Every structure is written in C-alpha cells, then in structure tokens.
Amino acid sequence: MGVVILVRHGQASFGAEDYDVLSETGWQQSRGLGAYLAGRGIVPGVVLRGDMRRHRETAQGLLDGAGWDVPVEVDRGWDEFDHLGVVAAYPDLPNAVPPGTPPGDRRAFQRLFELATERWTSGEHDGDYAESFPAFRGRVDDALDRACARAGSGATVVVVSSGGPVATACGLLVAPPEAEPAVAWQLWRRFNAVVVNSSFSRVIVGESGSRLLTFNEHPHLEGDALTYR
C-alpha cells in the first residue's frame, strides 16, 4: 500500500512586501516536521512541490530537518490559487473592510478572504476569474492523481503545497469531482479554514483506489509555533 503525505507550507510572511517567503517560524515549522517524520522512519521516494517560493523553502526545510537525500520535483498543479486576484474581484471591496482598519490586520483580511472565496466557489461568477473554482479543483485533481500514481502500491510520496490545494485534495477524496458545487464548496471551506501551517494529511493508495486516512496532523507543533496564517 502506497502513501501520499500532503504538507501545507510553513508560515509565510503575511503583511510583508513579499508574502511568498517563509517567516522564521515557517522555517522552524518545516524543519520540525522533517525531523518528526524522519524520527518515525518515514523516507519518501520523492518530494513533489508546487512552484512557489514558500513551497520550495518548505521542501528545503523538510529535507534539512529530516536529513533526507531524495529527489525534489516541481509539479505546478500544486500551486495555490491566486488569492489576491480572487479578493480583488470581490465587487464590494471598498465596504468589505471597516473604515479605519489598519493595513495588515489579520482579522479584517480573513473576513474579506472568506467573502471573496465564497463568491469564487459559488460557481455563479466563473467568468470574473482567471482560474475558476471548478478549473482549480480540476487542476488539483490531476495533480493528486499524478502523486498517487507515483506512490503506487508501496512507495511514499511527500507533496508540499498550500492550504487551498490541500483542502481541495482532501475534499476530492471525500466527495468526487462531479459533486454538486455547494458540496464541493462546503468541503473546501471547512478544510481550508482549519489547515495548519506545516501540517500533514495522509492518503493511502491501494488496489481499491486512494482514500483519505488522516487530515491536518501537527504533533510537531506547540505554543506559538502553531499558526494558520
């Protein structure tokens, strides 16, 4: 039986000029996860990652912490959706954040993010986005199929991605691609809201297909090291 381990990247630099860079906490989370997995005898045959800097740096932190000497390959199917583009397309953007809210306020951004992604995932405004939610879901479904094929019947594959694709992949393993849009959106929303930085979810791959075994494990994190953004 093969295993695919889906890893969300370590904490990125929210509020900084370049978000797509791991914070110091993000590096610590990534190295800690690598040490945790290696301590349990896990050695993947390959690490697949998205093509974003936070994916590359998280993969490097994993390898450093684990001491793995394994190939790392890029699969852009695991890239995050354009969350800034989705937020910018929200029609009531000027009124979504209360006046006087300081720049970089995490709670205000989270509220705006939830409103914008609810619109994006509804399926009613697909033409407003460079990548619609169904297209994003299909892209991740293809990437998940490729990762599971690499795991085969006995290999371990580690995938480093972002919260959106991890939530989508886990939702696809619970409900099929042809699920009603409302079902797909609810699953994605619930998974995406709670996935922790550097957490991992396990997918088992066998003759009967691929199944979600665990979601959002993070035993290597405690205290201030536990972050969501």
Image: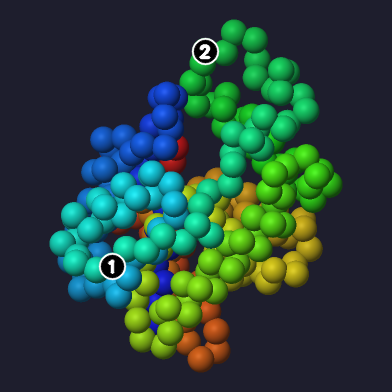
Quick one: SS at disc 1?
A: loop
Which residue is drawn at the image coordinates 39% and 50% (left, top)? Answer: 55
Q: Identify the image quadrant of residue 44.
A: bottom left
Q: Position of residue 218 (x, y in %)?
A: 34, 55
> Pointer 1: what residue?
71
Which labelled disc corresponds to residue 102?
2
Which residue is painted at 65% across and 15% down in the image?
98
Q: Report the amino acid beneath label 1.
A: Pro
Q: Which residue does the image show at 80% across and 44% down from the upper left?
A: 127
Labels 1 and 2: the sequence-earlier one: 1
Q: From this viewpoint, is residue 225 visible?
A: no
Q: Confirm whether residue 69 shows in the render.
A: yes
120 or 55, which is in the foreground? 55
Residue 68, placed above or below residue 11: below
The percent coordinates of residue 84 (x first, y second) are 59, 34
Task: Characterize the local packing of mark 2: few (<14), some (14-19) or many (20 or more) Cα atoms within 10 angstroms.
Answer: few
Q: Secondary structure at mark 2?
A: loop
Q: Quadrant of residue 151?
A: bottom left
